[in-house]
Each structure stands twice: as C-alpha cells, then as structure tokens.
C-alpha cells in the first residue's frame, strides 16, 4: 500500500500558492512533514483528508483514486485536525461510539471493544463519562487521537498532534503511533524536529507549498555531512561573517554559536560538526526564505 | 487617563464596526425601506393616507418605531456582539490581561455599539429626508404630499424614540449575552421584547388597560398608538410626540431598566474568567476496567444507503434532543405559548363577546398567534443547525468521516421537520385543553391533524427549506440570517409592491377556509397546484442544499461549484430533474390558468384598465338608461358542479323624460356565458371587459317598457391566483342579483378612487359621493342605478339534498329526478337587490302577529337561535310600531358559510354568516349581546333600505345605516337597559374617534357622509342616541315615522338627507335646533371634564355633591382643525351610587343642567351615598376624553 501524490497544486483565491507541484510517494510507516507555519502542511493534509479541493494533480492510495472516490478514502482514513472542537454536552464515550458508527463499525460488540481499548490507550478511561466540554486541552487532544484511530484506518493523518501534551502523554502517543505505523501509513506534521528524527521513517521538508527535500532522516543527514561548520564568536562580531551562509545562531553563555554552510572550512576557527536534521531544516529554510 | 481609555475603547469599537460590511448592510437596508416608503407606493411602513404628509413628524415617528421594532434583530446583532466577539474569537485571553478595567471595557464596547446602532437607524430619517427632496424632484410623488422639512421632525423621533429603543433593546441583549457568554440568548431577548409588545397589543383591545400597556411597552409601538390615538390629520402633520405624560413615563421606566441591566452586567461580568464552560460538577469517575485494553483495528464495511439512513435518524435524534434542551428554544416556545394562552382566552372577541371554542376557531387562533414565533424559530434554528458543527469546530472530523454527502444536510432538514412537528403538536394539545377547559367537547381531531400536520406543516417546511439552503451556502450565520430576512422582506415587498405573482412571490397560494357548513369545500383543490409548485420548489432547494452543502474547507466559490458538480449524479440528479419537472409542470398549469384561461392582472395593469374603461365609457354616465321593472327568474343551481344557470324574463322600463335608443350592459363576469334578447334590440358592441351595447330599433319612450330575456351560466373557469371563481359552493351557496344578471348603464364603481393615482393618469378628482343637493344624483338609487322598485318572482332548483331560498313567499315546491324546485313570489315591489341561497339546512319556525319567522341554519349551530328569533320579533315589532307597518308577512334568517363575515338584509331575507353570531358565546351576562344587536340591525333595514330607498348622494348611508343602528339601539335598550347602551356607545365613540384619524379623505358631517363607516355606523349611533336623549324617543320616532311614510317606496327621485334634515328643523322646537346643526350638519366635539367632586354629608342619608366642571365645545373642519365655540347648553349631571348587584349602576341623580364654556361649580343634593359624579356621565356627547366625565367623589368632613 502506497500513497502517491502527483503534481498536486493549489492556489487560494487571494493568490497564495498553498501547494506547488507536490510529488510524494509515501509507504507504510511514519512520514513526517516539517516546515514553518504557513508552509502548506495543513493544506496538504486537508487535501489528503478529502476536505479541500486541489486545482490539479492526483492522489492515489493503493488502488483508490482519491479525487474520484473520496468516500473510499474516507472509510480508511483517520484524521486529527490541528484544531478541533467537541460537542460540549456529550461524554467522550458516547461521542466515540457515535463517530465509530459513522465510520462504519456496525457491530456493536466490536464497536464497544474498540472504543474501550482506545479510551484505555489514550488514558481517558477514568474520565470517559465526563462531558467533553469539561475536558482539559491535553485530554481533548487525546480524545482527538482516539477518534482518529477508530475503525481500521490505513491512512492516518495527524496535524501537530502533540502540541499541548505533557512529556508523558507525548511519549505515550508516540508509542501508539509507532505501533499502528507498522501496518499503515501515518502522516504527521510537526514543528518538533527531534520527534521526526526519532519517529519517522521518512521526512519531507516543505516550504511555500513546495517539497524541498524528502528522504529518511539518516539519508538526509548523510547528505549534508561535511557541510556544516561551527564557531563561537562574540555577539558584536556577527557582522564580520555576513558574507558566509549562516544557517543559524544560538546564544550560549553570552556568546554566539554560529553555524555556517560550506563545502569546506570557510574560515579559521570553524569546526566541522556532526549534522542533524535541525541543521538541515535551518539550512533549507534559510535558502528558500 | 482612565476616561481616555474608555474613549479609546469606544472609538476602537466604532472604527471596527465602520469597517464591517454588516454595519453598512443594515444601514442601506433601513435607508432603502425609509426612502421607498417615502417616494413610492411599493413600500409601506405603518399607516399613510392621502392627507397625511409623507414627511410629517407622525409618519417619521411611526416609521422609526416600526422599523426599530422590526429591526430588533439588527439591534441584537449589533448590541449583543461586542463582548461576545472576544469570547467567540478567543481574543479574550490576551485582551483581558491588558491594563484596562472592567468598566472601561464593558461600557466602552457598549457605548460604541450603541452609537453605531444609532447611526444605522439614522438611515431612516435620512431616507425620509432625501425622499422628501428627491421624490417631488424626480416627479415620483406630487410635491403637495410633502410638508416643510423641520430638523426637529427628524431629530426628535430619531433620538428620543429610536435611540432610546435601541438602548432598551440593546441593553437587554448586551446583558444577556455578556453575562451568559452565549450569543443564542440574544434571540431569547428578541422574543421577550416581542412578547411584551404582543401582550400589550392584546391587552390594549380592552379599553381599561390602555395606560398600563403604554407604560409597559418597551419599543413604543403600542405607546405611540395610544398616545396619538385621537390625533387629527392636522395634528399628525405638525406635531412631534412630546416627551411628557405617558411617553415620558414610559421612556423613564425603560431607561432605568436599561441602566439597571447595565449595572447588573457590570457586577456579574467576570473579567477574569475566560471561555464559556460552565461550572458543572464532574461525574464521579468510573473505575471499572475496559473489556479490552488492546487496540486493534476493526474492519469497517462500506454501508448501504439504508444503513446510512438509519444512522442519519440517529444523528437527527441528537440534533432534536440538543435543540429541545436548549434554553433559548424553551424560551421561544414558552413565550409563544404564553401568547397563545392569552389569545385563546379571548377568542374572536367582538364587543367583548367571545366565540365558542369551535375547533376551527381555536386552530386559527393558534396558528395566528404562534405563527410569528414559528417563523422566528425557523430563521434562527435553521442557522443553529446548519452551523452547529462548524461553530463547534467539529466539522473537520465529521467531514472526513465516510458519510455520504446527503447525510448531514438531510439530517438537518429532518431535524427541522421533527422540531416543527413537535411544536405543532404542542399547539394542538393546548388547543384541545382550551376546548376542554371551556367545557366544550365538540373536538374535531381530524381537522386538527389536517390543519397542523398537513396544511400548516407543508407551508412551514417551505420556509425551512429555503432558510436551510441559504444557511448552507453563505459564509457565516449572520449573513444567512440577513438573507433569510431579505427573503421575508421580498415576499412582503412583492405583496405590498403590487408586483406580486404566485409564480415568483415566495410561497403564495390561495388560503383555505374551513366552514362547518361547507367543510374544506373546493379550497383544497384550489390550493393544490400552487402548493405542488412551491413544494417542488422547496424540494429543489433541498437538492441544491445537498449539492452545495459545505464539507471540509472551501477556499472559494470555484471549489463549491466543483464539489456541486461532483455531487450532481445519481439520486441528486434524479431528484433535481424530477423536482424541476414537477415545478415546471405545475408552474405551466398555473400559468395557463392564470394567463390564458383567465386574465391575470398586476394592480398596475388593473389600474390602467380601469382608466381605459373610464375614459372610453364615462360619457355613458349621462345617457338615460332603462330600469329593471320586473324580473321573473328561473335559477338552476348544481352545487356539486359549482354551476348555476339562469333564465330571466324581464321588463325594462324607461323612467326618464327622454327616449332611450341604446343600452349598456355590464356583465357580472366577463368570462361567463350570457345571452340577452331584447325585443327590437340588437347587440352592436361587445367588449372584452364584459361591456355590451344594445341598440333599440324603436327608441324606448318615457314611461314605456319592453320585455327582454336573459340567460346566463356561471361555473369555475380554470382558476386564478386566489382560487376558482364561482358563486356556487358545495353546500351553503349565497349569491345575489349582481352574480347572475348584468347591471345596466355605466357604473362609477369601477373607477379608480385614489386621488393621487387619478392625478397621475390625468383624470379629474372623483368625489366619493355626489353632493347632497345634486338633483341628478337624487334620481339615482343608492343601492344600484339600474332599478327603482321591481316586481319579483323566482323559481329556483337545486340538488335533491339541498333547499334553495330566494326573497318572496314560497308558492310551490316540487321535485324532479335528483332535483328540488321552489317557486317564490313577492306580492309587493322590492328593491332590485335579492339573494339566493342553497344548502342543507335545518329550520326553526315561529309565528307572531300574523308574521312568520324562520331561521334556516346548519345542524349543530343551535346555540343562539333563541336570541336571534327574539331579535327578529322584537325588531319587527319595534320598527312597525315606531315607524311604519312591516311590508312583508315573513322574516327569515339564513346561515351561510363564513367566507364572508357579515349579515346582509335583503327583502324579507337576511343571510347571516356562520361566524357572526351563530357561534358567539353569549352565555356570560353583562356582555354586549351582538347576536341580538346584529339581528335587530338587519331587520331594521327592512325599513331603512327596503322601504326607504336612499339616493346615490351624500348622506345616503345616514338614512340607511345610521337609522338601522338607532333602531337596533332602541330594541337593545328595551331588552338590556341603559348600562349596556353606555357600554356599547363607548365602543362606538372609540371607533368614531379612531376612524376620523385614519380617514383617507376628509371627514364629513353626518348628513353628508360619503360611505365612511366610522361616521354612518359609529357616529350615527352616537348622534341618534343623543337626539333621542334630548328630544325624547317619542318625538324622535314621530319625526322618523313621518319621514318614512312620506318617502317609502319612492323613487326616482329617491330619499335624500337634505329633506331629512329639513324635516327635523321644521319639527323640533327652536330651542333644540342647535342640536340638528351640531349633530347632523356639522362636526361638533366637546371637551368635558369633571375636575373635583366633593361630597359633604347632610345627615339623614342626604349628601351635598359639589362638582367643579370644565367644558369646551369645538367645531372641526374637514381636516380636523378645531375652532372653539360658544357653549351654553343643557347637559346631564349625574351622581352615581355604588354598583348594584349584577353590575347594575344606580343613579342617585341624573338631570340636565345648563353648562357654560370654561370652569363652573354645580351643586346637587342627593339621597343615598354617592360614589361617582360628573358631567355627561352617560357619554351622550362626543368627547375626546370620555373617561374624565365621571370621577370618584371625595368625602369632606
């Protein structure tokens, strides 16, 4: 099973190019989408979730032509939007049951079993009878995850799912995703590059609606080996290095830690660093800003 | 610094609002309404008559009050929003952390919104002002319909009425929403204010409550009506509503309520709390273990449509339950039901007498009073339902579920349907309870079901469909509300704007009137094509809703269309074309019937036709035309076909001094079959509009007659926008001569009446009636120009199960297969005014003094037959004794269906509407028994109308109607006593004073009245009762009797009112002549007031009553300009004891005193303890403030 995105483009009526000729092939496992705010991650995910039309291009999941057969995709889709609400006066359990039946789980025993398992997995079991309106942000987010996993999704799309979760919850969630990611396609968007590095089989960097790089985290890091250099300088010295391709600067005990992109040592004092995805992220974003 | 902050917040609010399109949308809406109300006849807001200037302060005030009341939705959108906006957009979190205080925040926002709302409604005076300049400049409205513009005419209504209204309404909405942080409560606020108004209007119909109503009216509609109730046209044109008395108190009361609410809001608003979540306690945590802790995917199968349908029902259930648990919903329903209860306790009240709670009476009352709530419910809850998921941000999850595209829209439609059904059921249950509560057990469940679940439900669902579609395609809910409102307004505007057509004016179909005589009759069939058309239209709207229903995120209309195209397949496509086909099919059928079979005409075209006919035929008015002299009819009624054929043998007579060479006939209906044969006559011209001209070979010489035959047939020809047209119904047909035979000669009745319109078409002004002294007019019969008194006989046949009745005495009755035949013959001449009725009747008979009395009625309507019978006998006896002998040997009442709600007097025959009297509830003592009164009035017409034939000139209605009123009053007084009279006359006075305010033309003195109901009925009663009081019944009746005897069966010339007045002037003593001048020849008003009434005890149960009385007398010209007159005349001074048992009043003293103008003191000594005293206590004279005549006495030591 593979999700193939071909030449996907979308321009909003106000002229913003949300997606520009996106081509991606995504297999089972976790796929990370990384990019700054407004890069087009959510647009892409909503398009994948059949919630938004594209101007051109195609998406196929296995043998499903998504634009031609949205219903088929929806029945194998789990989607957690970036921001979502709940019916305030209904309990989590009732709501999950309702959504499960709308996903097509007609057998009530199966439904019950899955709903209860999910409530347990997302640590909502004790509070399952409470009205959703009284849930905290974290609980709501976990509820959102639970609903995304109802039925048997083959494509799970989660848009910044761990925002607002505490470290334990985040961890728990990651494990859950990894668990299901063994058999289905999980597309995850996030700001947290560390998560991508540890979780995702493959990563795409997106900016201004374009895919800049795709690959496994290791490959991507490999590609930039020997190209990132570091030096610690005084804060007022920064101007002297403006001719270099500065990827990022960090303040470190009153001094500036500068990372520079170069094929060879740009100047004395710069040391080669062992690159990571974050270096790549900054480098890419800087290049395409 | 602090104040500056408040100002800054305020200015920010104003600036923000000025950038919002909604603000300008509202502004433009009201501007246009006001502008077009001023410059065209298309839009009408509140009243408006020819003499009332289009920019008069009264008109502006009325418009302001009306529009701020109608625009209460707009006020709520503006005023409820400022704080809620921050909650909704979650800006509250950082905003509340800014260095501002709660007061600055709340009041800054509030004042800003208020100013914006004032600005929005400022478009109304602006619209009128520009209208007053542009209207005449562009030649739309003649300049004389505008007065001079004064700033205060505009500013006063805007600021003193409009701004306060907005403040009152606004503070309610603002408080509700700000404290609760729920926008939906603003709707409840709307409803509350509406209920206040409606309850007020309801209470207002009872005289004693007026002051209270005026005070409690938040928006001023009732207040305005009460405080300007008796304003004359002159006053309306020049007076603003002064801030004093009731108006001031009202404004102060509501301003303080506003401030109170704002203070409450200030204290209740928690500036530190954010979000909307309540303080609900969490349920106890459950610790049982789940059946499975191991997540594994569960395979899902694609569901069949049937399974989705079942799931949709589940969703529907959720929506319905959520709605009926909603506080505002309960609020709407509750307040609506409160109104319904009030309404039901006051069914069909006429002169305080109610109708029996018959099922149709209850059903109509329920539909009427709850109708508005239903519409409001539909407008708001379609919005709530459609926006539910999107508002709560659940839509993204929902929309990515594999439910089919029709799932959500249809769930919402179904929910709306169920909710409406639920409300209908509530109403029905309330109706049944009301009936039971009144001890009335004739409950017609079938009628309830059919009315509520079929007729009304289908109509409401049409509105729900269009509202759902609109909400589904707009970008936000408020735009949706606005557009739905536009649909409503467009319907209203089409209706008023004279461009209404049932094919494009939303949901227009002929009404259905249930009658216990005729059931639903032919109305179901009449309404069916129209309802089919509009239901198909609504279904089409639903298909469009499914096609365009938002799913996911649309980034523009392009996306919408793309999705719609994708969805346009399978069932959607089929439904679309099916509904379109039904719509086109039924639409074509309607078009065919309206335009091809019949001549549909817009009012404008109708006007043009009227003008054309007048221009082309007016000269016939002067041509001498023959009279009907004798008529022998053979009428065959086929009720089941709604068909009637007529064979008439006729004699036409020339009553004039010149010969007649040609005759103009005007047909009752230009589509009917008609054949006219006149001896020596030939049809020479036949016009489409049903005007036929016959030429006579040998001119008809003065005094000569010629025979003619006429045969006609009437039956429905297709249908028109108001249904199928035939005088015959299945049971209870009631029609008259003008439905069967042509009228002879030109009739001014067809002419355009409206002054301004006539001017527009270049026609000379048309007087409402010919001058009282116009000798030519005196030769024309007031009841119709084509006859004087005729010889009459009639054979009438009908189906075997019905009886047919016509004027005259039954001479013969026989049957033929499937038919019954009756032969009626009149042995004395009658007016050319006869009714024929056919139905399945029961009969009640009585005999007295050689006269037989009959009532023909619908089985089951026995309630008031005894009252009617007594009314018949008493009135015949009174009139025969007082005026002249009764000309017939028989008097009959025949019931007819409630399609008309009058009783009408034909020779020895009074058709009497089912809904007038037959089902009145007269069981309560002390109420005015209008069954008896109406019966007496109609019987009196056998003298005033059938013995006296008035001329077609000013004063005709005085001779016919005022004198019938007087006769009925006398019959009533004999029966019920003086107290009832006073009660009745108070209603008459009230109607007269209101009527003279709204006369579109000018008020006339009684003897010159020009078919002005408030004069010939209401003032007529007062005048003749006063004459009776001053002259004495005996003397008055002697003069009337002399007049009748002299003029009975006379014409031409016909009886005129100048002779009548002259007879009075000749017969009354000199000292009473002023009465004739004042009451008949002029418009005279009094202002009588008792200022103090002090009582001292003289011992021995004797008391001295000392009154301070103020009196003034006016004469009014035709526009209501009043001139003070010298006053020195006799008036009643009365001293009343406490009410006797049964509410009877007892006068300790009642005698006439000479009263001068100005203040004066009067002393009388009475035996017995006084309670009230005053001048003219019986309200005999026309006094604009009748309630201050009699006041409570003050005991002095």
Image: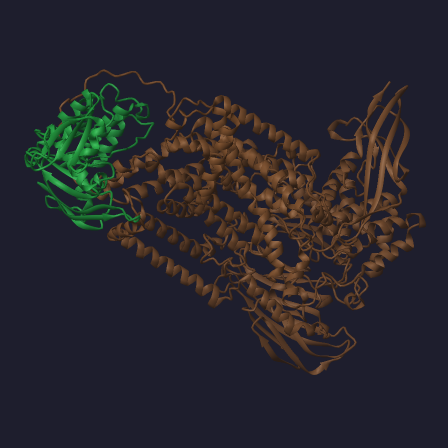
Chain colours: A green, B brown
**Which image quadrant for residue B477?**
top left
**In the rendering, at what x and y percent does residue A25 appear?**
10, 42
Please, is residue B100 above or below residue B841 in the view? above
Q: How many marks?
A: 0
Front residue of B838 and A209: A209
**In the rendering, at what x and y percent does residue B514 appear?**
52, 48
- Classify residue B75 as left or right of residue B939: left
Whether residue B175 is visible here, answered yes or no, is: no
Front residue of B345 and B81: B81
Quarter of the image with the C terminus of chain B in it? top right
- Classify residue B15 as left or right of residue A70: right
Front residue of B39 and A97: B39
**In the rendering, at what x and y percent does residue B827 appear?**
73, 63
Whether residue B1070 is visible here, answered yes or no, is: yes
**In the rendering, at what x and y percent does residue A141 appear?**
24, 27
Identify the residue at the far right of this view: B1070
Front residue of B931 and B39: B39
**Which image quadrant for residue A113?**
top left
Identify the residue at the far bottom of this view: B697
- Classify residue B943 as left or right of residue B168: right
Please, is residue B7 above or below residue B936 in the view? above
- Classify residue A36 as left or right of residue B853: left
């Amino acid at each position: 099973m593979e999700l193939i995105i071909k030449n996907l483009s979308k321009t909003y009526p106000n002229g913003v190019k949300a997606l520009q000729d996106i081509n991606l092939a995504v297999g089972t496992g976790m796929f990370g989408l990384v990019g700054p705010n407004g890069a087009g991650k959510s647009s892409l995910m909503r398009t994948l979730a059949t919630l938004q039309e594209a101007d051109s291009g195609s998406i196929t999941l296995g043998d499903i032509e998504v634009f031609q057969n949205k219903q088929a995709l929806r029945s194998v889709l789990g989607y957690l939007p970036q921001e979502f609400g709940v019916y305030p006066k209904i309990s989590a359990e009732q709501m999950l049951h309702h959504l499960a039946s709308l996903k097509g789980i007609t057998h009530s025993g199966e439904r019950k079993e899955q709903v209860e398992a999910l409530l347990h997995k997302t640590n909502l079991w004790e509070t399952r009878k409470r009205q959703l309106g009284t849930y905290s942000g974290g609980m709501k987010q976990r509820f959102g995850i639970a609903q995304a996993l109802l039925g048997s999704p083959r494509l799970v799309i989660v848009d910044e799912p761990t925002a607002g979760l505490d470290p334990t919850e985040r961890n728990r969630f990651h494990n859950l995703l990894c668990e299901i990611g063994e058999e289905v396609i999980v597309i995850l968007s996030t700001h947290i590059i560390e998560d991508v590095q540890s979780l995702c089989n493959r990563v795409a960097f997106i900016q201004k609606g374009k895919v800049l790089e795709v690959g496994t985290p290791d490959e991507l890091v490999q590609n930039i080996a020997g190209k990132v250099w570091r030096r610690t300088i005084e804060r007022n010295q920064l101007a002297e290095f403006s001719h270099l391709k500065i990827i990022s600067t960090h303040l470190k005990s009153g001094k500036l830690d500068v990372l520079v992109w170069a094929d060879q040592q740009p100047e004395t004092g710069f040391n080669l660093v062992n690159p990571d995805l974050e270096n790549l992220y900054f480098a890419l974003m800087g290049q395409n800003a | 610094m602090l104040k500056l902050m408040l100002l800054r917040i305020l200015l920010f609010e104003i600036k923000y609002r000025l950038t919002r399109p909604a603000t300008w949308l509202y502004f433009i809406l009201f501007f246009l309404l006001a502008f077009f109300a001023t410059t065209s006849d298309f839009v009408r807001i509140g009243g408006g008559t020819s003499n009332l200037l289009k920019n008069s302060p009264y008109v502006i005030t009325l418009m302001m009050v009306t529009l701020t009341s109608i625009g209460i939705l707009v006020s709520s959108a503006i005023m409820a929003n400022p704080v809620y906006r921050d909650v909704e957009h979650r800006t509250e979190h950082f905003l509340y952390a800014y260095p501002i205080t709660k007061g600055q925040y709340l009041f800054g926002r509030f004042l800003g919104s208020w100013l914006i709302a004032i600005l929005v409604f400022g478009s109304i005076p602006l619209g009128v002002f520009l209208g007053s300049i542009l209207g005449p400049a562009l030649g739309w409205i003649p300049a004389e319909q505008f007065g001079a513009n004064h700033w205060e005419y505009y500013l006063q209504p805007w600021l003193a009425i409009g701004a306060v209204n907005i403040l009152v309404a606004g503070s309610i909405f603002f408080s509700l929403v700000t404290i609760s942080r729920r926008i939906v409560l603003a709707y409840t606020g709307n409803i509350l204010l509406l209920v206040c108004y409606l309850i007020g209007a309801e209470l207002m119909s009872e005289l004693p409550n007026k002051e209270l109503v005026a005070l409690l009216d938040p928006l001023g509609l009732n207040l305005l009506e009460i405080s300007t109730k008796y304003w004359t046209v002159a006053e309306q044109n020049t007076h603003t509503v002064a801030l004093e008395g009731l108006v001031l108190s009202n404004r102060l009361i509501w301003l303080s309520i506003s401030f109170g609410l704002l203070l409450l809001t200030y204290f209740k608003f928690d500036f530190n709390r954010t979000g909307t979540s309540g303080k609900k306690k969490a349920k106890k945590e459950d610790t049982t273990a789940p059946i499975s802790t191991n997540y594994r995917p569960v395979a899902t199968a694609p569901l069949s449509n049937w399974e989705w349908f079942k799931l949709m029902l589940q969703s529907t259930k959720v929506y319905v339950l959520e709605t009926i648990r909603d506080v505002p919903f309960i609020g709407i329903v509750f307040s609506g039901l409160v109104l319904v209860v009030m309404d039901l306790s006051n069914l069909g009240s006429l002169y305080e007498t109610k109708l029996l709670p018959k099922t149709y009476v209850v059903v109509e009352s329920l539909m009427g009073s709850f109708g508005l709530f239903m519409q409001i419910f539909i407008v708001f809850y379609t919005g709530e339902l459609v926006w539910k998921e999107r508002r709560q941000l659940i839509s993204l999850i929902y929309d990515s579920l594999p439910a089919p595209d029709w799932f959500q829209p249809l769930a919402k439609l179904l929910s709306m349907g169920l909710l409406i059904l639920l409300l209908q059921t509530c109403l029905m249950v309330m109706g049944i309870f009301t009936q039971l509560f009144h001890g009335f057990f004739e409950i017609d469940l079938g009628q309830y079901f059919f009315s509520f679940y079929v007729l009304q439900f289908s109509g409401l669902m049409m509105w729900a469909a269009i509202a759902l579609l609109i909400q589904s395609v707009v970008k936000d809910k408020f735009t949706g509300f606005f557009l739905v409102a536009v649909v409503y307004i467009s319907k209203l505007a089409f209706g008023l704007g004279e461009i209404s057509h049932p094919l494009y004016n939303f949901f227009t179909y002929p009404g259905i009137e249930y009658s216990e005589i005729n059931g639903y009759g032919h109305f179901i069939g009449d309404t069916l094509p129209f309802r089919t058309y509009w239901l198909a239209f609504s279904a089409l709207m639903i298909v469009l809703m499914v096609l365009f229903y938002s799913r996911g995120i649309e980034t523009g209309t392009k996306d919408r269309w793309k999705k719609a195209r994708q969805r346009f397949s399978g069932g959607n496509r089929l439904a679309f074309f099916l509904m379109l086909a039904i719509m086109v099919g039924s639409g074509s059928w309607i078009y065919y019937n309206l335009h091809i079979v019949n001549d549909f005409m817009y009012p404008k075209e109708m006007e043009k036709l009227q003008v054309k006919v007048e221009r082309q035929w007016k000269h016939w008015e002067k041509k001498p035309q023959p009279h009907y002299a004798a008529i022998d009819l053979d009428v065959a009624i086929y009720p089941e076909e709604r068909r009637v054929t007529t064979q008439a043998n006729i004699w036409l007579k020339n009553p004039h001094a010149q010969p007649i060479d040609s005759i103009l006939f005007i047909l009752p209906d230009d589509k009917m079959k008609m054949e006219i044969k006149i001896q020596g006559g030939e049809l020479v011209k036949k016009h489409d509009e049903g005007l036929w001209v016959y030429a006579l070979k040998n001119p008809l010489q003065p005094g000569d007659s010629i025979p003619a035959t006429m045969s006609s047939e009437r039956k429905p020809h297709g249908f028109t926008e108001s249904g199928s047209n035939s005088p015959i119904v299945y049971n209870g047909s009631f029609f008259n001569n003008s439905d069967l035979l042509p009228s002879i000669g030109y009739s001014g009745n067809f002419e355009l009446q409206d002054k301004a319109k006539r001017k527009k078409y270049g026609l000379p002004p048309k007087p409402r009636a010919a001058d009282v002294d116009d000798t030519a007019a005196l030769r024309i019969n007031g009841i119709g120009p084509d006859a004087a008194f005729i010889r009459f006989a009639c054979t009438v046949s009908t189906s075997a199960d019905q009886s047919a009745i016509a004027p005259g005495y039954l001479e013969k009755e026989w049957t033929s297969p499937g038919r019954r035949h009756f032969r009626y013959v009149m042995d004395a001449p009658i007016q050319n005014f006869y009714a024929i009725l056919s139905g399945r009747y029961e009969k009640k008979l009585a005999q007295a003094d050689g006269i037989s009395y009959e009532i023909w009625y619908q089985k089951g309507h026995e309630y008031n037959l005894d009252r009617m019978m007594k009314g018949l006998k008493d009135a015949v006896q009174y009139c025969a004794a007082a005026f002249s002998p009764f000309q017939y040997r028989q008097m009959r009442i025949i019931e007819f269906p409630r399609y008309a709600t009058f009783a009408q007097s034909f020779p020895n025959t009074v058709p009497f509407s089912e809904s007038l009297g037959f089902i009145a509830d007269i069981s309560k003592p002390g109420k005015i028994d209008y069954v008896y009164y109406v019966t007496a009035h109609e019987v009196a017409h056998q003298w005033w109308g059938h013995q006296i034939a008035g001329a077609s000139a000013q004063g005709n209605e005085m001779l016919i109607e005022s004198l019938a009123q007087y006769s009925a009053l006398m019959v009533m007084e004999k029966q019920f006593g003086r107290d009832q009279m006073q009660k009745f006359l108070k209603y008459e006075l009230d109607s007269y004073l209101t009527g003279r305010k709204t006369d579109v033309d000018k008020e006339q003195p009684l003897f010159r009245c020009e078919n002005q109901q408030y004069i010939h009925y209401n003032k007529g009663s007062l005048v003749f009762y006063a004459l009776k009081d001053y002259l004495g019944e005996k003397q008055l009746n002697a003069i009337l009797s002399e007049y009748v005897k002299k003029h009975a069966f006379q014409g031409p010339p016909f009886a005129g009112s100048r002779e009548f007045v002259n007879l009075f002037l000749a017969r009354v003593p000199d000292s009473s002549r002023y009465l004739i001048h004042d009451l008949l020849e002029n418009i005279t008003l009094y202002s009588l007031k008792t200022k103090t009434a002090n009582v001292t005890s003289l011992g021995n149960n004797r008391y001295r009553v000392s009154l301070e009385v103020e009196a003034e007398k006016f004469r009014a010209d035709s526009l209501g300009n009043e001139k003070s007159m010298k006053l020195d005349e006799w008036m009643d001074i009365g001293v009343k004891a406490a009410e006797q048992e049964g509410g009877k009043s007892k006068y300790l003293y009642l005698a006439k005193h000479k009263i001068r103008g100005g203040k004066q003191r009067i002393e009388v000594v009475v035996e017995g303890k006084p309670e009230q005293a005053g001048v003219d206590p019986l309200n005999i004279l026309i006094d604009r403030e009748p309630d201050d005549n009699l006041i409570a006495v003050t005991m002095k030591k």
